[in-house]
Amino acid sequence: MKKITTLSFVFLMSLGLFAQQQNQPLYLLFEFMKVNDEMNSDYMEVENFWTEIHKQRVADGNIIGWDLWAMSPGGSEQGSQYFTVTLFSSLEAMLQGFPDGKFDEYLRKAHPNMSEEELGQWMEKTVVSRDIAHQVYCKEINNTEGDFDMPIGTLLKFDIMKQLDNSYEKVENDIFKPWHQQLVDNGQKEAWGLIKVLLPAGSQALGSHMTYSMYSSYKQMAGDMEGGGGGTMDTMTGLAVKQGLETRDWRMVEAARLIMKVR
């Protein structure tokens, strides 16, 4: 994921991506993984192992869901090749992670036929298969309306923003969101949204927010990237957009594909 693993923050997605109810807060823990080429198959096995644990967490109400995304381009010299997103219903739950004493319970329920030795081996394999380069705490802010349920294979393009003015979030809501809603309604993209980084934060962080666009095909994504997916704007809207662009510094664009999902 290029230089993302050198950043002091990274983020992704929002309400529309995870089919949350309107007005229900959604908190997101992003964990960016650096995986060496020779460990790629082991890492996939590890995430399949953990998928069963995440299913137990969802059943217990500890988390809302969990996803695994593959970065593109994802060369070993570009930083992280994958990231996971764990969804929580509250900041407290996200900060805590696993409730006290619950991890062993989830582990044994997820893999009831494994011995203690086998479980230990999987924990060791987890450690050696990847390096968790960064963890980032986020909260959803806004998103377009629609019924896109983010199936496996969903494509994502996200833009890292650094807020320059306190009006930035209002600009995204009042000016840019209606334009993206038009693109969603026209079938030119599947979803758009805005999230805010909670931690890490501060003047040294690369960015403070991220906008994302989701696509159901590479054709749809390419059309948007090449400018063919743009909606129409009247003169006044165009002027407002020009002023709105001055409220943030556009730092970086990245892309990913959804390869695992638990709900």
Image: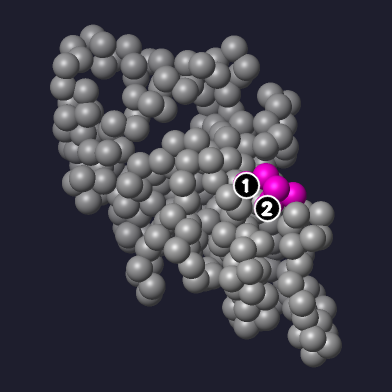
Please state which of residues 254 and 205 is positioned toward the viewer in this rendering: 254
Q: Which mark is residue 220?
A: 2
Q: How many numbered badges does the structure rendering display?
A: 2
Q: Do the numbered discs 2 and 1 sit on residues whose CB atoms are within 8 Å?
A: yes
What secondary structure prevails in the magenta region?
helix
What residue lies at 28% left-to-right and 15% top-to-bottom? 120
- Residue tagged 1: 217
Q: Which mark is residue 55?
A: none
> For the residue carrying disc 2, how many other residues have a C-alpha within 10 Å: few (<14), some (14-19), or many (20+)?
some
Mark 2 secondary-structure assignment? helix
What residue lies at 63% left-to-right and 78% top-to-bottom? 178
Magenta segment range?
Answer: 217-222
Kind of residue sitting beneath label 2:
Gln
| Distance between the alpha carbons at the discs numbered 2 and 1 | 5 Å
Q: Please, is residue 61 above or below residue 257 in the view?
A: below
Q: Residue furthest bottom?
A: 236
Please state which of residues 59 and 11 is positioned toward the viewer in this rendering: 59
Q: Position of residue 189 (x, y in %)?
A: 63, 60
Q: Picture quarter containing residue 116?
A: top left
Would residue 114 be counted in the magenta stretch?
no
Q: Please, is residue 142 above or below residue 152 in the view?
A: below
Q: Picture quarter containing residue 164?
A: bottom right
Does residue 262 appear left or right of residue 35 in this picture?
left
> For the residue carrying disc 1, how many other residues have a C-alpha within 10 Å: few (<14), some (14-19), or many (20+)?
few
Please state which of residues 37 and 7 is positioned toward the viewer in this rendering: 37
